[in-house]
Image (spheres, rainbow, N blue to C red):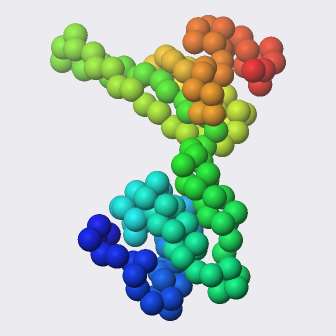
Amino acid sequence: MNDSFDYLERDPEFRYMLLGRMRSDCDYFLGNGGRNEKDLWGGNIERHIEIMEELYYSFPKSKRPDWISIADIESYAIRMKSNPKRYLVIWNTNQYFDDSDDVRTYKHSTYCDTYEEAVNCYVGACESEGSCVHIIDTRTGRDAIEKDVSENRKSRIFGRFRR
């Protein structure tokens, strides 16, 4: 986007089409676009939503598009700013080298939609050569399960999906 470009000074037909294009950018961002802000006409989420609101309010009430509302734009803002996955699972794995005593630790992570999926990933990581570190609830930023690996193995058998 060119900051010196004054889109609000353009004719209503142009503003109407630009708003439609920006709505399509939102749909692409949330779908096949992989949440890449570089694909947004506004350059980033905040500016993109701000421009959409400016365009929407640039029309007289009787001439505003019926295919989008300010509530739709606010909904895009919320969905685009939120993390699409609920849980983040982080664990370490160690790689041992046969020809030396060298050990490298790699940090891995994956996002999961459900707590059950996160626990399955967590338990799988704990049973591999590494040790599991965290399941983080992306809405609160807090651990959703204890950090202790042996306790997790017990929780898999005795009430695997407790919070």
- In the image, taking residue 7 as reference, residue 116 lies left or right, namely right
* Whole-percent x, y for residue 33 in the image: 47, 64
Q: Judge whether 130 appears above or below 37 on screen.
A: above
What is the total number of numbered labels drawn onto the structure image?
0
The image quadrant of residue 120 is top right
- What x and y, as percent, mark residue 14? 45, 88
Name the side, left or right, on which 67 lies relative to 51: right
Residue 118 visible in this rendered orientation of the protein: yes
**What residue occupies the far left of the structure in this picture?**
99
Kindly identify the residue that appears in the image at 33 percent across and 20 percent down: 105
Q: Nearer the viewer, residue 34 or 79?
A: 79
Name the residue: 66% across, 22% down. 144
Residue 77 point in image, percent of width and height: 58, 56
Q: Is residue 24 visible?
A: no
Q: State which quadrant residue 122 falls in.
A: top right
Q: Relative to 25, say whether 91 is above or below.
A: above
* In the image: residue 114, left or right of residue 53: right
109 vs 121, left or right, is left
Most foreground residue, 162 or 80: 80
95 or 66: nearer the viewer: 66
Tell me if residue 114 comes above or below residue 159 in the rendering: below
Write the residue at 58% across / 46% down.
Answer: 82
Quadrant showing the N terminus = bottom left
| Residue 81 or residue 101, whichever sits in front | 81
Q: In what quadrant of the picture does the C terminus appear?
A: top right
The residue lying at 77 percent from left, 17 percent from top is 157
